[in-house]
Image (cartoon, rainbow, N blue to C red):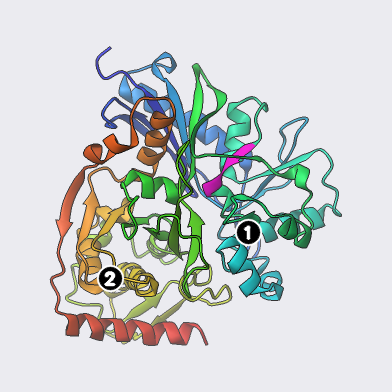
Amino acid sequence: MENAVVILAIDQGTTGTTCLAVGEGLEVLGRASVPVPVATPRPGWVEQDAETLWRSVEQAAAAALADAGRTGRDVQAIGVANQRETTVLWERATGRPVAPAIVWQDRRTAARCRELPADEIRARTGLTPDPYFSATKLEWLLRERGGDAAGLAFGTVDSWLLWRLSGGAVHATDVSNASRTMLLDLASLAWSEELLERFSVPRELLPELRRSAEPVADGVLGEIRAPVAGLAGDQQASLYGHGCVAPGETKATYGTGAFVLTACGGDCSPPPHGLVRTAAALPLHAQPRYALEGSIFVAGAALQWLRDGLGLLDDVRDSERIARSVPSSGGVHFVPALAGLGSPHWAPDARGLVSGLTRGTKAGHLVRAALESIAFQTRDVLDALPAPPPALRVDGGAAANGFLTQFLADVCRVPVEVAAEQETTALGAAALAGIATGRWREDELAGMRRSASRVEPGLDAEAAAALLAGWRDAVARALL
């Protein structure tokens, strides 16, 4: 069949699951998204139901195939990308989760993270002690059970989905996801016995470590029977989908949060201040690859808060029009520390702040300030890199916002290349699965990468510096 589906790409994210049916040229033949709820039972706590995550995958996969006019029999491989660090604990015998999944945004272990030896952990894992990562979440879950780990399995969302796809036959994760747990030795890409002991995590809880592109399980999903051959954390999958492999190539993905990753080859040394170093997606037979990362906890979520919390937006897609309704933010700055601040500050206790309000402040000023905050936070991350990137490749829902992409180019002082396909994370998962099953060679992927536009900086350096100074003054207040 012409344009037969070859890959089902699953991107299980924080607020929804997207599936793509991907064809021979890495083109999208069909797509579907299913929202998933997030619970906040206490201040700083963020949870999800792992069974709901699985059901969303089932629903989105079926809908994507229907959208493509294909059936499960057309699928030759499955690629999975996932929200990282979110921690699931389940019974091996039944597959039943024993507690709600603790989402990456959760802050309940902030006090514990302050007790940890930051330099030692950064040297071993490339990460900064923060409740964002999985280790203290898992430690907390086990402590709540009185330390009883008998018959249980731990995993990030990729492991949970792989367990379900394989009918409980395979308990595994790839190195890109494992590097986000704060339990992996980054240089050896092996579980660290020292860290397991520090966090009182029994080795038998952990998944087997695998590469990001290799057949890892026989997957069953509805009428689909195909190997699960691509597995990567969402941001590493996006980096791969953008074709960022050579050192210095940089991408930013804008979703609930925003994540800036720069490929850095085989360098696994401790990261520069304000950044973390992580394992990049790793195909079979390739040498280990790493990336520097800046994690921005709140990006699109700031617009969602303006919609749901303040009622200033009916739809986040209206944000570009509303932002353009005013000539500037009118001196208003919005520091969206709604879940603390990530890179380069790593301040889990920081709280959101809006400054510069006057009686003349309108909804447009707040909406514009929210969009500007996404660009300002990106600039803060780029400034922490050893060198500025030649360009910033962007994807995600907010990358379709023309106001934001131009402001990004203006403030960050680099060209912004907007991906033609905003679901670059899912395309990265598909590419990994295709490579693992012999559909493509890695050197062929560059020719499949498509950009929708290239946005050049339109603001002079002096004006950009003045805007940045106002932003950093507001951040300093949020950090008090």
Q: Which residues are magenta?
A: 172-176
Residue 157 falls in which quadrant of the image? Answer: top right
Label 2 residue SS:
helix
Residue 260 falls in which quadrant of the image? Answer: bottom left
Relative side of 285 to 64, left or right:
right
Do the residues bearing badges 2 and 1 touch, measured as CB atoms within 8 Å?
Answer: no
Q: Which one is nearer the viewer's eye here, 145 or 390? A: 390
Relative side of 48 to 98, left or right:
left
| Amino acid tagged 1 | Met
| Viewport quadrant of the N terminus | top left
| Residue 225 painted magenta | no
Query: What percent of the width, then of the height, locates residue 107?
Result: 62, 66
| Residue shown at the point (41%, 36%) measured from the top left | 432
| Amino acid tagged 2 | Arg
Residue receiving disc 2: 368
| Residue shown at the point (30%, 46%) measured from the top left | 422
Q: Which one is nearer the viewer's eye here, 361 or 152? A: 152
